[in-house]
Image (cartoon, grey):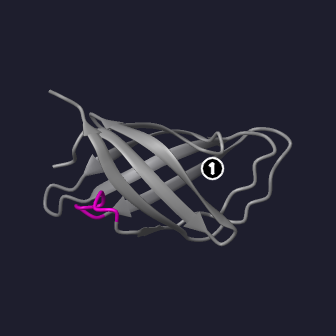
Amino acid sequence: MAVDGFYRFVYAGRTGSGLGLLALHRGNITGVDGGGGEYDGHYTQDAATGGLSVHVEILVPPNVPLVIGAAARAEPWSLHIDAELPAHFAGAIPVTVPTPFGPLSVSFKLLRRFEA
């Protein structure tokens, strides 16, 4: 079962790296990263495998290039990412996440669980 809580994530692409914070709560995802990106989305869990199907929209602020090689833009823009995470994704083991601009290596660590 997915654990509702706060997660630190560290990511790396072909031009750099960064970190952020995600909250997973009752199927919803909300977060931020060090570059000012804002994350909103949802997840579902596969009952058989325990893995997560994640769907996230990232609002990218103006003048911020992405570590996956996307150039900075003068206006804010959105990047949609769909990913499949294994059941034990929060074990700080990197997971490859596909993006429209190339792969992203992401590792997650559970910082704090939400209390029921």
Task: Where is residue 111? Give x, y as percent.
Answer: 31, 43
Indicate the quadrant where residue 115 lies: top left
Task: Where is residue 85? Give x, y as percent.
Answer: 34, 61
Indicate the quadrant where residue 49 lies: bottom left
* Residue that sits furthest to the top in the current view: 116
Q: At 52% from the left edge and 60% from the top edge, which residue is drawn?
A: 11
User: What residue would you read off at disc 1?
Assistant: 79
* Residue that sits furthest to the front in the current view: 111
Q: Is residue 90 magenta?
A: yes
Q: Is residue 101 above or below residue 63?
A: below
Count of marks placed on residues = 1
The magenta stretch is: 86-92
Dominant SS in magenta: loop
Q: Nearest the camera: 93 or 84?
A: 93
Q: At 34% from the left edge and 53% from the top edge, which residue is drawn?
A: 109
Task: Where is residue 54? Give x, y as percent.
Answer: 39, 52
Q: At 14% from the left edge and 27% from the top edge, which residue is drawn?
A: 116
Q: At 34% from the left edge and 68% from the top edge, which residue is drawn?
A: 93
Q: Is residue 15 magenta?
A: no
* Residue that sits furthest to the right in the current view: 74
Judge left or right: residue 99 versus residue 91: right
